[in-house]
Amino acid sequence: MSGRVLVGVKRVIDYAVKIRVKPDNSGVVTDGVKHSMNPFCEIAVEEAVKLKEKKLIKEVVAVSCGPQQAQETIRTALAMGADRGIHVQVTGKDYETLGPLQVSKILAALAKKEDAQLIILGKQAIDDDCNQTGQMTAALLDWPQGTFASEVSMEGDKLKVVREIDGGLEMIKINTPAVVSADLRLNTPRYATLPNIMKAKKKKIANVNPADLGVDLTSRVEILRVDEPPQRQAGVKVETVDDLVGKLKDTGRI
Amino acid sequence: INTAKKKRRVLHPSVCRSLSALAELPEMHQILRQTCRDYADKELAPIAAKLDKEHSYPAKQIQELGAMGVMAMEVPEEFGGAGMDYLAYSVAMEEISRGCASTGVIVSVNNSLYIGPILKFGTEEQKKQWITPFTTGEKVGCFALSEPGNGSDAGAASTVASQDGDEWVLNGTKAWITNCWDASATVVFATTDKKLKHKCILVPMPHPGLSLGKKEDKLGIRASSTANIILEDCRIPLGNMLGPRGAGFKIAMQTLDSGRIGIASQALGIAQASLDCAADYAQKRNAFGAPIAKLQAIQFKLADMAVASLLRDSKKPFTKEAAMAKLAASEAATYCAHQAIQILGGMGFVTDMPAERHYRDARITEIYEGTSEIQRLVIAGQLLKEYQQ
């Protein structure tokens, strides 16, 4: 067992930024807009670093797919305690159409190349909210998956994962190697300490081409148009519960 | 008066400024800035009003900052510090102060005024004893130079350290000492009997012969303690002297030179906080049927505040530039805070909004670590020197 964990980290538009649609409706404005690490990816990094501090795994490798700026996101992961980084270079049109399927293929290829024991990802990215990469990666590798994790622990050579599901909490035990996707309550990501920020400067980030991994970046998804959500309409106040039921029936809601 | 129909967007000045500043900073410093900003936004800003109201020392936050390495930023790792540079310290100070100016001054005094001189002039042994325990946030230090009888005229110090066998005996009173009620050690400046040769002595706190005056009830930075330190036959081992005999004045001046950048950064942080507060309010508050942000007069004020802040960014730790930075930044802070209250109107005058606290916190930056008048003298002095060369 290599004791190696791959953590995927995605560079997304910062959660506090007001999103604007491009005038040609082809996408959202990203130029000059503040970006940061996807919040669920932060939680994934924190969990990996915690596992290393508990000596359950030996090495944390942060992976990001994208243009040059993706390196900033990897450095943040290194400052939080990851040991080294892999920057998979994807630029231009390929980057615009990069989606969960291609990223999963990349992660699967890297997992085999790096002999990873565990892949931890955020459950979804706050820009596309796909919630697919973790599941697809596990399927491509034919590994078990523990998604929406709110708790992760090792029990012998099995991974115990508590999952947040619609009905409440579900506990599963899966074999490793496995894929885990982090949910909100898994942990509270640490503030990087200044010595770790300094150390991050010296940690290595390897550059990799998707072609070298044998991955085809062609997208099966075509974006036709991006629009702002419709303006929120004013609500209607009703006096009684009967009125409410009546209104709901009238508008075909029930 | 512009109506709501006008589509032209006002580019948020703080976005402008932070973009330009971010574009210039090296990557590590950007990560540092973001880390400190996140900490300030989440842990300091929400409690700043309460700390101010209750005059309470943020012990928990100081320890958390210590764990991050912020309490000893330039100290080499071998002594327990973060091993970072001046630019990093400046960036951190600005972001921390933006969240809470009181926390900022506590961080600044520990870094620049207490650890600063020991790092520069101390022996290896002194560094281990007097710096390492003060890097974690568990202990903080303070700087005792000013006296009731002299502030700007530092050379007129009358606190005396006379030698008696293998001890110094200290007598005198120091005034306006930030952190002293929460400190575990102080750097004291004293003279030798009747001669004007100054000494710099490390004194642990508490210690027999050292007592603290009552806490000053200040206009601003209220969560940090400020009081007199009274020395009455306070006996200290000879080995606690910092640097060579007679170097005290030089140590004090060099320390203040460096400390200036910390305070300049603190002032910028306060200015930024005022700007954020005012711009946010201006975009939400409606008057005459539109957000007041669209009123030209308000736009002019915001622009002036942004320009004042931009021009005051200086990161070079040289005497003239440091003095210029401190002078300009502190005046920008008071200007921005003043304008912020003006923009908020009545709301700026009450404690519901942070503008009044920024106004009170900003005021001291023009006074401590060298008054604006002293800064002008320093700048003029350096300028004239340059012309003479």
Image (cartoon, coloured by chain):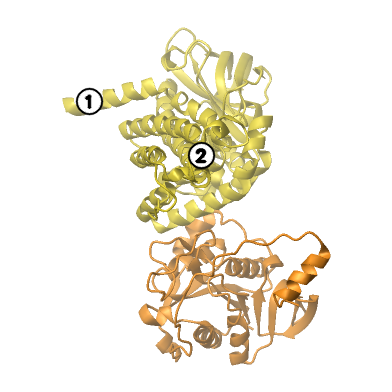
Chain colours: A orange, B yellow
Which residue, as the protein is rendered here, is positioned at the far top? B194
Residue B206: x, y in percent? 68, 25
Q: 10 Å neighbourhood of mark 2: few (<14), some, or many (≥20)?
A: few
Type of residue at label 1? Lys
Residue B302: x, y in percent? 40, 40
Q: Is residue B388 above or below residue A48?
A: above
Number of numbered discs present? 2
Q: Quadrant of the N terminus of chain B?
A: top left
Is residue B264 found left or right of A126 in the rendered image? left
Q: CA distance from mark 2 to mark 1?
A: 35 Å
Quarter residue A4 falls in? bottom right
Residue picked out by circle 2: B124
Q: Disc 2, disc 1: CB below 8 Å? A: no
Is residue A79 found left or right of B249 in the rendered image? right
Residue A15: x, y in percent? 54, 62
Q: Mark 1 falls on what kind of element?
A: helix
Q: 10 Å neighbourhood of mark 1: few (<14), some, or many (≥20)?
A: few
